[in-house]
Image: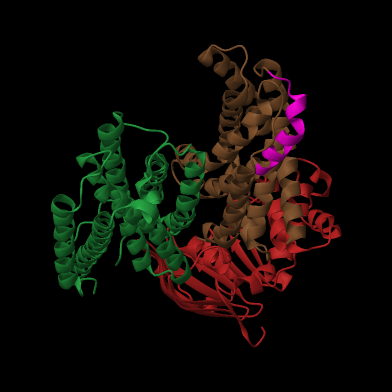
Chain colours: A brown, B green, C red
Amino acid sequence: MTRIVGVLLRKELVLELRMRESIPAMALFSVTVFVVFHFGLDADQVEGQLAAGVLWVTMLLAALLGINRLFVTDAEQGGFDAFLLAPVDRTALYVAKAIALLVYLLVVQLVAIPAFGFLLLGPGLEQALPGLLLVVVLADIGICVIGTLVAAIAIRTRTRDLIVPLLALPLLIPVVLAASELTAPLLAEGGAQALPGRWLTLVSIYDLLFALIAYAIFDFLLED
Amino acid sequence: MYGKGLRPLAAATALSVTAALALVFFWAPNDADQGFIQKIFYIHVPIAIVALCGFVAGGIMALQYLRTRDPSWDLRSYVAIHLSLMLAVGVLVTGSIWAKGSWGQWWLWDEPMLVSFLIVFLLYACYQPLRFSIEQPETQARYAAVFAVVAGAFVPINFAAVRMAESYIHPRTLGTTTGGMPGEMMITFLVALVAVALLFVTLWKYELASKSARFQLRALRKRLGADVPAPRRSGAPELS
Amino acid sequence: MGSSPVVELNGLGRRFGERAALEGVTLTVPAGATVAVLGPNGAGKSTLLRILAGLLRPTEGVAQVLGSKLPDEGWAVRGRVGFLAHEPMLYRELTARENLAFHAGLFGVARERVDEVLDAVGLGARAGDRVAELSRGMTQRVSVARAVLHDPEVLLLDEPVANLDPGAAAQVAPLIGAASGRTRILTSHDPDAAVAEADLVLALRDGRAVYAGAAADVDLAGLYA
């Protein structure tokens, strides 16, 4: 299983490096949304809960772009069938895709979060960084766990671009909620405060629950 | 086969709904703070609980479909989700009326029941479009089942998350019941809950019976060689 | 020809909703035999091959390959069947070698085998080119290499030589032709040629078998009258 995930993930990252379909678009989109927020809110600087909300809504929307494209190459170029012909555990495809999406998100955030700090954030980013890193990883896992599942469902529908946001947005509301509740005290004016533990628990349970469900039912999305 | 037991079930439902309404209007006392408007609680909360259970049950039936590949489980899950979705609309409407009557506003973001049902409604509103956008009936059933399982698990966790986010301003009638709700109120509430649950099961069975009768009729007419028009493509499951 | 049958179909059928794409197909294929599956477009040829490849679940009847029932026991035979489908199943932005290395990884095949099959299909020199840069015929040859990469015992070939010029077709013959020693089930746009190299013929029309038997006895003109 681990070896197959490695093979699939390698192919995924080589394709992304070569085609540059997801990461640059997602990063560019994030920065653009920050600019849009600047005008929409008519605010030069944001902090606390508002900053956390702006950051996570933007991350969620950017993630949707990646989710939408996640299986397109495989569906169009027969990669699905090729994978299904191989004598391997089919859940490996889910794991590899989720990890690939996680990598995309983390790389995008490597650009987007400093850009957010530079463009919109009132308080300094440095104070928030250690806590923010934990929040980002936990929330990103949630986004990837659900996002990969939604992407796999939507790829077989005739209206993929509509189904992806319509399914993923409501499903990810708890993640955005928890992530912005967790991020708000980090971005507060006057120094980062401690992370509220119950939200960490909630997002961890969310990640674990849907990872298990996805693991159990992903196979049903592959066969014909 | 779905029609079996429908008659006594319908009678029990009619009886309990009548009893619940009678208790609500003639027996249960008016709430000390909110007055008459609080009585909407006896509809709002039971349908919310039943809708919640209906969504989860739809997910479990979908899981059953995935295990057995028996299309009738897909039909059961589909009907349960549809009914729950209608109840969810009821929850939003009654909750809105309650909010307006008691707090003077049609919408309250700090009312976890309303907010989480809005999210659940938005999610399940995609169930039908999702089915409709998949051509193959078998693929459609399978993908809808996967959705129903994920969404069924999402309903409780979403409720927990939204509840955690609220600042507990709202007087949570159900939450305080264990301590303070007068006995009459509690009994009325429980009868109303049973009534709505029975209503749900009756409607569920009725819809299943009607759908399967239609499929059987179509199959019979086909065997007789009648010219049966192909059904209009829809997102609804088909049994043959 | 070996003794135990490699492929056994019994009343095999597949419905898509109301429409039956395949219905009541029964056929036994001994080891090493070549089956030509004939029929006009939409007769169910591709459906049959996809079922045998384990990509499509039959709705009626039994499909057994190498002693395992499809698709539930499919995992047992997946590594022993090669499928050359209509679409090449190659990533256009990866090179021929990268594509095959990817499949080698999935099938647990040694990396040296990749260059070996690429040489065998005559593309050793173009192995570093992206598939998008290759002509249709070359893409088909890479696809052939992909299908035989894991040295399968059974080959499912959907119009294997449709895009190949005679020279290229001759080049891939040792891999996917009768000389390969594999059990082959193939469709072709050219019935005469297909029947000439086949031991058995399965002729389909509207999903039903109109002929299933020895290639020597088939009356092509009668079938397509």
Q: In which quarter of the image is residue B205?
A: bottom left
* Residue located farthest toward the bottom when viewing the structure as drawn: C3
Residue drawn at 67 percent across, 85 percent down: C2
Stretch in magenta: A123-138
Residue C167 shows in this picture: no
Quarter where residue A216 is shown:
bottom right
Indicate whether C44 appears above or below A150: below
Name the one closer to the observer, A200 or B231.
Answer: A200
Residue located 45% across and 55% down the image: B152
- Main SS of the magenta segment? helix
Q: Residue furthest right?
A: C112
Q: Which quarter of the figure is the N terminus of chain B placed in?
A: bottom left
Measuring from the top left, give residue C150's x and y in whole percent: 75, 65
Q: How many marks?
A: 0
Is residue A185 shown above or below B154? above
Tell whether C120 sits left or right of C201: right
- A135 within the magenta span: yes
Seen from the viewer's position, the closer of residues B232 and C155 is: B232
Residue C159 or residue C24, whichever sits in front? C24
Q: Where is residue B68 in the image (x, y as percent from the top left)?
A: 44, 71
Quarter occupied by the C terminus of chain B: bottom left
- Residue B36 in the image: state x and y as whole percent: 20, 41
Q: Is residue A109 visible?
A: yes
| Identity of the residue drawn at 69% across and 51% down | A96
From what the image shows, is residue B141 above or below residue A32? below
Residue B188 lies left or right of residue A79; in this view the side is left
Q: Nearer the viewer, residue A180 or C28?
A: A180
Asked if residue B52 is among those painted magenta in the image, a careful observer would answer no
Image-based side of C59 in relation to B220, left or right? right
